[in-house]
Image (tube, coloured by chain):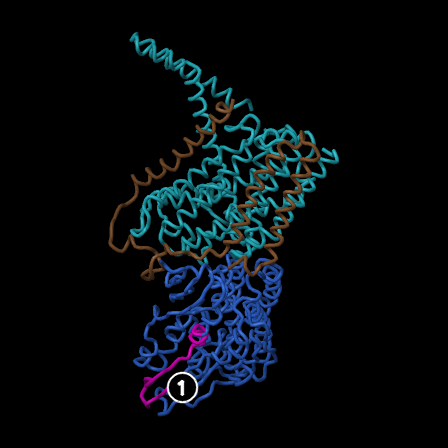
Chain colours: A blue, B cyan, C brown
Amino acid sequence: MPSDEMWINMGPQHPFNHGLWNLRVKLKGETITQAEPIIGYLHRGWEKMVENRTYSQIVPLADRLCYGSSLSWNHLYCLTAEKLFGIEAPERAKYIRVAVLELQRITSHLTWLMAVGTDLGSYTIMTWSIRERELFLDLLCKLSGARMTYNYCRIGGVRNDFPENYERDVNRTLDEFERRLRDLESLMDENEPFLMRTVGIGKMDGKTAMNLGLTGPIMRASGVDMDLRRLDPYEVYEDMKFEICTHTDGDVYARYRVRMDEMRESMKIVRQAMAEAPSGPIRVKAPRCPPKGNAVCHVEDPRGESLMYMVSDGTERPYRLKVRSPNFVNLSASPPMLLGFKISDVPAIMGVMDMCIGETDR
Amino acid sequence: MSNLYIELTNFTEWLLGLVAALLDWTKLGFLSDFGDWLQTAPVVDFVSTLLVAVIFLITAMMFGLCFIWQERKTLGRFMDRRGTQVGFLGFFQNFADGIKVILKEHIVPKDSDHLLFELAIFAYLASTFMLFGCIPYSDNFYVIDVDLAVLLGIAIFAFGPFSILIGGWSSNNKFTLIGGMRAAAQLIALEIPLLLCIVSVAVLTGDLSFVGVVTWQEENIWLIVPLCIGALTFFIAAIGESERIPFDLPEAEAELVEGWATEYGDVRWGLQMASDYFRAYILCGLFTMLFLGGWAGPEFIWAEAWYLSKTFIVFFFFIWVRAATVRIRTDQILKLGWRRLLPLAVVNLLIAVALKVAGVF
Amino acid sequence: MLVDDYFPVAMFALVALLIPAVAIIMGKLFRPTKQAEMRNTTYECGERPIGVAQIQFHVQFYIYAIIFVAFDILTVFLIVWAMAFDGLSDIANIAAITFLVILLAGVYYSLKKERILWI
């Protein structure tokens, strides 16, 4: 007699996989009784690859870790390398970095919203958030000349200063975006089917989330007040005034809410950083070879805590570079969230995680 | 417009007369007899009915394609983009898509049940095309005019979920299996409210042929006024029955790849996609007939044009709902059907009975 | 005559059956027919399928299906009743409404036991 349960491969070629990975679920009817994420389809050997590159050659490669938020990985690499080299970026570069990182956070969150829209079956959410993202891509393009892989940070500063009238452009865009964000929110918060699909789905309490090592918006949605921009400030985040957005429900809706609120806070930070940036140099010269030793740095990526650990043997190439990707850990914590929910909830639960396989598989 | 049947019977008589005259001209006895036989009433009836069916089906399919075009353009505007651009106002996109799917490969999965796999999609498509005939455009432009035309339409409509279930099972694929089961769930959830709304219409009008329902509405009032609750219920159930977002569970692409149609390729898949719109078109037509007075309207344009414009307006609301909502789950659709729509439909039926008993209509 | 009335239905069904047949034959004339070993395998997102899909599927809306059957028959009676509404006596109408109410009470009862509805 055949069993009434079946294993089903959702991925690597599945519309809800944003990237190549496989979620193997065991279904009884439509209810998930067991789940098992499988990765490795996009493994490029990034960590090994960079061992054969000089320090400055790795800067553009760090962009390629994630298509959604390439700048934050780029920045993290530069920050870690600076620590290893024993240099520090000038004050103005730090302000510029903070402003650009927060712009990148907004674009990343809008990309995530697009994915959530397609996962839940509303292409209007997708096209609207893509339209809004275009505003910020234009800004970043004006600054760095690229739309996706910016290659903007350098070891010891940033590549170039703000172009002419950049602050004015940014402020105009942010004013416009604040208006549009309200529109976008009304499309979801006042939408009964959206609430039916998100409220109470994929629940996880703060304690379990901490034990599983979750970070980022998913962690904050479970009521844990953890943001590295506050706990361990890097660059000039300690001077910035912003709230850490948390939510207590720990369900899909809470995760969605946290990210939407975060976009508002990011806008605040961008405005402050642009206004308070002192004048001065934007880059210091970095030596070719760092001293022997190691350095570790962690930052608050749009997806959670990302960390780089770098070991130098005194040559011009790193001896070892280890990446801790937030998605890798968040993904491994997904089975407890999925259990007991329907197969229809898989895209909702995994969609709000903001999967980025580039950084997960490396 | 004059009656399609009379026009085409006249045309057939003329055509067959011409053929008979040609056969007579050969001066061969048996051919002349054959010509005489061609002019007998059953043959004329057969040929003219065939012609009516073909003409009606082609017209209906053209308007079905207009629905696809309308969806593409309107949805584009809702999403702040332009929609399709191929050809005149993007209308040729449908034909380009048709040519494309005809050129695609046909793959039958080797583990599937080959016979049922082919039969299921064939039944689905044939029942969809069959539906076209059920809805008349006016009291002159029609094919099928039977006493229970509304019921006939619903009966053929219910064929769809069965073929989906069989197709999903026979593909031997897990996604299609779940998709097929969901089609059954959808039928279970929404069929009863839909039928109860039709019952309430029948109570008031005392007739289930389209001509009767529309004539009643012409004489009294559009049924959407007394039966507004029923109209709303029917509208929601119709969106569900036509498998559109927010109720497109059988082919929920985010979780089930392409749902029950995952294993189908080539022209079968293309026609299946078109069928979704054709079925939506039929349900919009049903809504127009039952609640919006069908082809009734001031006579400065054709009755058919009234019917079609009302149908397009109803479909606009279908698209609006699609643009604004997300897909819901199977358990939620069952809850919606049994806890929300069924009570509404029963209340609507009681209102209809009360109006009838009180002698308002 | 019933036969005369339904003759167009039969004719239209014939035409409706022809359309997909013609389309499929058209496709057969134009489409490529390459064969390959992996091409005919079941699609499961690019992975090898785990087991077959024709299992004893756990139909979770089974209870709903049972209520549905009862109600479907009810609607058949109701349609007959509605069509003949004008000529019926009050007692017949009351009987029909009672029938509806009894079934609705049954539905209400089963919907209250929500836990067993979706198993």
State the residue in front, A92 or B337.
B337
Image coordinates of residue B279 in percent, x first then y, are 50, 42
Chain that bears disc 1: A
Which percent across, then down, holds residue B207?
61, 31
In the picture, the quarter occupied by the N terminus of chain A is bottom left
Pinpoint residue A188: horizontal percent, then vertical percent.
59, 61
**A326 in magenta:** yes
The kind of residue on which mark 1 rests is: Ala
Q: Count up the numbered dots.
A: 1
- For residue C79, side relative to residue C20 (left or right): right
Task: Reply above or below: B277 against A140.
Answer: above
Task: Quickly name the residue at label 1.
Answer: A286
Does the image show residue A122?
no
Q: Secondary structure at mark 1?
A: loop
User: Magenta segment range?
Assistant: A310-332
Please, is residue B330 above or below residue A351 in the view?
Answer: above
Q: Quadrant of the C terminus of chain A?
A: bottom left
Rendered view: B280 above or below A305? above
The front one of C96 and B207 is C96
Q: Is residue A121 left or right of residue A175?
A: left
Q: Is residue A247 magenta?
A: no
Is residue B279 in view? yes
Dot 1, how many residues are within 10 Å of its Cα: few (below 14), some (14-19), or many (20+)? some
Question: Percent position (x, y) of residue B312?
Answer: 56, 40
